[in-house]
Structures are given as C-alpha cells and as structure tokens.
Amino acid sequence: MSHSLPLFGVVSTTDMEQIAIKILRSGQIASGPYVDMFEAGFASLIDCHYALAINDMTNAIHLALRLAKVEAGDEVITTSFSCMASNSPIALCGASPVWVDIKENSVEVDPILFEAAITSKTKAAIIYHVAGYASQIDEIADICKRYNIKLIEDCNNSLLATLNGKNLGSFGDYSIFSFYPNRQINCTEGAMLICKDKGDYKLGKQLRRLGIDFSIFRNEIGEIDPNADIPIANSAMSLNNLCSALGYMQLKNVKSRLEKSKNNANFYRTALMALPTVKIVSTLVNSEAAHWVFLVQVKNRDEIISFMKNNGVNVSSLHQRNDVYSCFNAEPKKNIPNTVFLQETILALPCGWWLSSADVQLIVEVLRKAILITRSTPSLI
C-alpha cells in the first residue's frame, strides 16, 4: 500500500483554524463566551439540560464520583475492559472497584451479574458503552434506582448512540463525553459532564473551578471578596475558551460524520458474514451504535493485528483489562470469563468518517488475507 489507513481520524476544519486564530489574538483563551456556547450547543445536540465543560474525561468522572459522594471505603461497580481514564478516578477517591462481567459475544454489561455485585458498600456504578456500543443501560438504571446507587454513564466515544430511541447519556445520574483528539468531537482535550439533577449541576459548576462560587467571589470593583467563603476545595477542571470554541465549531457537522461511520459499519456487517472465522460483536436490539470503531472477535488476534499493520491497516485490541493493575489494590478478577475471552479475541477495525468505501473494502480484504495466513501456520492455530 502507498499509505496507511488509520484506526482513528482527527477532525480538522477551516472553521476550527479560523476560530483558534481569532481567540489566540483576542487573549480570551482561559475563559470566554464559547464555554457557555459549547455547553448549550452540546446539550441541545444530545437533548439534555445540565452540561458542564471539563478539561478532560478523567476529571469529569472524578467530579461525578465526588457529586455522588463516593469516598474512601466505598465500592463502585465497573467493568474491567475499559480505559484507565475511566476507572482511575475510583482509586483517586479511595474507593474500590467491583469488576462485573459482560455478556458473551458482546461488550454489554450483564444486568443480572451487575445486580449480584451490589453490596452494602456500593455507592455508585460506572457503565462504559464500549466504543459506542450500548449496554442495557435502561435495566441497569432501574436497578440503581431500586438500590439508591448513583449511575455514571461513560459515553466517552458514544456520541449520538441510542437505545430505544434515547441518546446514551440520558439514562444515568451523570454521563461523560470525551473530546480527546480521536473522538467524534476534537477539542484537543476535554469532556462534557451531564448532570440530571440541577443541584448537582450547580455544585459541579462550583467545584470544577477550585470550589469557587463565582456569583459571590468578586466585589463591586471586580476584586476578590474577602468575605466570600470556599467551603469545598477542588482542583481546576474547567474547559478553556479556546478548546470550547473548537468543539462548538464542530457541532453543525457531527451528525454527517457519524452517518458515514454508520454506513461503513453496515458494509462491514454484510461483508464479514463471508468470513466464518470472524465473529461480529453483537449490538443490542433497538440500539444504534456510534461505531467509534467496528468490533469483531478472531482467533490468533495478535498475529492478525501484526499482519494487518504490516500491510497498511491500523487495527487494535483497544483496551487492556484494568483489573490486572496493582493501583486498585485488588487481585486480578478470576470470575469474569467473558471479559477474559474478549480481551484475548477482540479486534477493532477502522470505521470512521475519514474512510472511503474503497478503504473499507480494502480493510476487509486485508483481514481475509490475515486470517488465511494465520490459519495456514500450525504454530499460530
């Protein structure tokens, strides 16, 4: 191949370049009108009310856990097949993760196992919609309500994915969307924290900026009011005006980009049916995935990854099980067999808006060749 097909694309438009130059020249880089504009535009896009722009998704999840009053000694139900950006806030709070398994041939959290994992110490749950594939979040939300558990939806790459016609991110008490460069919206960094409760939103808005209540922080001459108290301290978590403006400029075209990803996914579903050794990871009935990538399961996965990369197609195993990391102060989980099998077999194929129809056809052909070669090598079977 004359060039390499990337696993992820990075949105870069003339509008983004122009607004970046405008803001850099204005000097309004840290704060400014685009923070509010981006929050309002994003809230309208996903049909929610209380949106807080945060400087990265880990801080957004950490803030959600603080709003949920998660403290040292508490338990947070989560999944192991995820990014550390999602689960590290549990350790930062001094809480313990409780790893729950997924369903077979899927990346969906099993609601039955989820409920069985609840104890008297369970304070919250983080449900990651892996790569934009919906979990049974409606059932899990009902379980959380019954047990008075705060539910955090990790929608970091699930923008405009739906379940039963509702956007992912609208089921939990809190939800998080990422604006890391390779997400559906590229702010160079950043996230959006969605709060269902207005009180959580108001407190979150205060906590994201060192715990300061800016409605009373400055006096009539614009100086810090010595009588303004800060009852709860926190770190600085606000998304700046420059990054917010970059995100705001992408809102008008994000649906068309995601439509291209959907078309590529539909092609894969049809084309990969001709490859019996490839198992397409299932999606829930009545759901629409965002398809950050297209997920399949294969034998000899690492050999297939190596072959495809050597032939110009960037693919990935996506994540590493988090339960193996010692920072969580727990032994690796032994009774999550579906997660273990997924970790050994998962293959993420490029699926996004930057790929042409010829590109996805080529990816299928390279995958077919990779399977034939690994099957013909006895040591790799």
Image: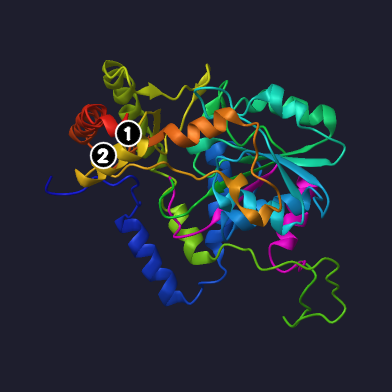
Tell me the SS state at disc 1.
Answer: helix
Where in the figure is residue 365, as x and y percent of width and height? 19, 29
The amino acid type, in three-letter code, at marker 2 is Leu
Is residue 189 on the magenta stretch?
A: yes
Where in the figure is residue 294, as x and y percent of width and height? 38, 32
Distance from disc 2 to disc 1, alpha carbons, whole Å, reads 8 Å
Q: Quadrant of residue 97?
A: top right
The residue nearer to you, when weighing 86 against 205, is 86
Q: Is residue 29 above or below residue 76?
A: below
- The residue under the point 55% across, 40% down is 81
First in sequence: mark 2 or mark 1? 1
Residue behind mark 1:
260
**Given contact means CB atoms under 8 Å apart, are the residues at marks 2 and 1 in contact?**
yes
Is residue 37 on the magenta stretch?
A: no
The residue nearer to you, when weighing 355 against 83, is 83
Q: Is residue 316 above or below residue 138?
A: below
Q: Which residues are magenta?
A: 184-213
Where in the figure is residue 208, as x and y percent of width and height? 69, 62
The amino acid type, in three-letter code, at marker 1 is Lys
Residue 351 visible here: yes
Tell me the SS state at disc 2.
Answer: loop
The residue nearer to you, when weighing 49 against 69, is 69
- Quadrant for the C terminus in the image: top left
- The residue under the point 68% across, 52% down is 328
Residue behind mark 2:
355
Tell me, for residue 352, which label it has, or none: none
Q: Nearer the viewer, mark 2 or mark 1?
A: 2
Q: Quadrant of residue 126?
A: top right
Direction front: furthest residue? 379
Query: Badge 2: few (under 14), some or many (20 or more) residues near its Cα, within 10 Å?
Result: some
